[in-house]
Amino acid sequence: MSEGSSMRTRAYALLVTLGCAKNEVDTDRMRALLERAGIVEVDTVEEADVVILNTCSFLASATQEGIEVTLQLAEQAAEGVRSVPIIMCGCIPSRYGAELPSELPEVAAFVPSDEEDGIADVVAEVLSLEPLPEGEPGLTPGGISDDVLPLRTVQGASAFVKVSEGCNRFCTFCAIPYIRGRYHSRPADEIVAEVRALAEGGVREVVLVGQDTGVWGSDLAEGESLAGLLRRVAEAMRPYHGWVRVLYLQPEGMTDELVSVFRDVDEVLPYIDIPIQHCSSEVLRRMGRKGSPAELAALFDRLRAEIPGIVIRTTAMAGFPGETDEEADELVSFLEDQGVDYCSVFSYSPEEGTRAAEMDGQVPDDVKLERTQRLVDLAEQMGFAATASHVGEEADVIIDGVEEGDDGPELVGHTWFQAPDTDGAVHIAEGEAAVGDVVRCRLTDAFCYELEGTIVEDGNDGSDE
Ligand code: SF4
């Protein structure tokens, strides 16, 4: 694209993100920094001067995927007429920094998570770029002020907003605290300013994420808490009739004040994501986590009693070291009894550098697979039933885009009980709406995690202001 120019003032970058929503947020931040530096995003390796790959290393399989994608990209890059360097960012460089240059010579530079704010400088160095002329702006999306680093929506009109980084819990199976460091909260003013800017730019739902959102504020001034932050974020979304969703609330984080926010603040969706991982007291103890079946059941009972209509999502892990057949059964029974709406299932994998990887009693792969499959089957049974239970209801749907359906193009969106990109979608065969519109729908049918709907009237499509 820029071949033949002797003076490089602008470069073209392909951004590829692997991993979770938190990584999407990090890529959005890098995207904004790159745009500000005059580096333009493109969609293919062929168009790019540089490829920026944001990696995940939460599990060994994620690391493997990151390496495979790197090699594929390197292959594609080598097929072009000019060399396209790859910059690897995120969790793999954070976790394996020193070993990587010799292991992955295909990569031009490695940028750990905590150095991603310097991404534009790294690109400039790798490409030997000349600085942009003074005053030439980066491309700032959505007219968002320079004081707030603009973030792109990651799905339609929903945006993930990171409230914290790192984790202090050190669950014995998890490498995150070693990769991302100790917990630190983003200041409330910064989060609220970002939410306001996103809403002004057309975002109708903010999804607050962090490794452990429930303890947000614990490292800030006394009195700061997630409950208080949610009230402020809700206030920022109110003029736009926007929604506020929270993910990754550890069970111990559910204070009375927080429960009351989920119950009483209209913008905060009554959708609670509590990753329990297991219910057995003994397995939880070995995981370095707290709780017992009775305590967790009491928590779910309390949430259901105090927040009418609440939707609960959780996470369960199969095959943790030392997990007996009885403990695996206990988890299945617990989930059956609780009948949560959505459940993500992980098969335990030993992560280098974690305490669990060194524990006795590693569960053989075939047993792990069988236990994982039981949990997946149960999760689907619960998830499909939860989805079908909404048939016949009317609900607001945020339009995320248009997809090719069985009978031609259809609108696709999600409603309050579906976290974007996670819990399925609502498909609307007829009607017109733009991305970001909120339309009132009757939910007419369900298939697995998907719903069909028909528009009954226009909802809100913007600000009161
Ligand atoms: S709470 Fe546990 S599983 Fe979650 S990021 Fe922290 S250490 Fe990892």
Image (cartoon, grey):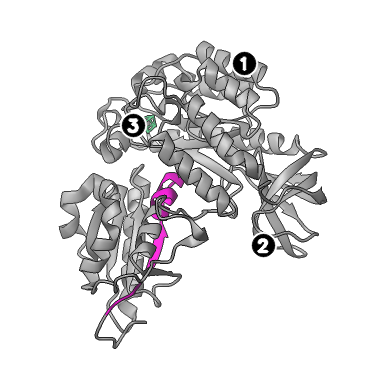
Q: Nearer the viewer, mark 1 or mark 3?
A: 3
* Element carrying mark 2: strand
Image coordinates of residue 18 in percent, x first then y, are: 41, 53
Quarter of the figure with residue 175: top left
Q: Quadrant of ligand 1?
A: top left
* Label 3 packing within 10 angstroms: few (<14), some (14-19), many (20+): many
Judging depth in this view, the residue of 380 and 273 nearest the camera is: 273
The mark that comes first in sequence, 1 or 3, is: 3
Disc 3 marks a residue whose amino acid type is: Cys
Q: Report if the beta carbon of the residue with label 3 is closer than 8 angstroms to ligand 1.
A: yes
- The residue identified by callout 2 is 403
State the separation of the CA atoms marked 3 and 2. 38 Å
- Of the residues under marks 3 and 2, which one precedes in the sequence? 3
Q: Does 7 appear above or below 334?
A: below
Circles 1 and 3, Cβ within 8 Å, touching? The answer is no
**Residue that numbered label 1 is attached to:** 301
Give the percent coordinates (x, y) of residue 320.
39, 28
> What residue would you read off at disc 3?
167
Residue flagged by tag 1: what amino acid is it?
Asp
Q: Amino acid at mark 2?
A: Glu
Question: Which SS class for mark 1?
Answer: helix
Measure the C-alpha gap from mark 2 to mark 1: 39 Å
- Residue in the picture at 29% in, 52% down: 116
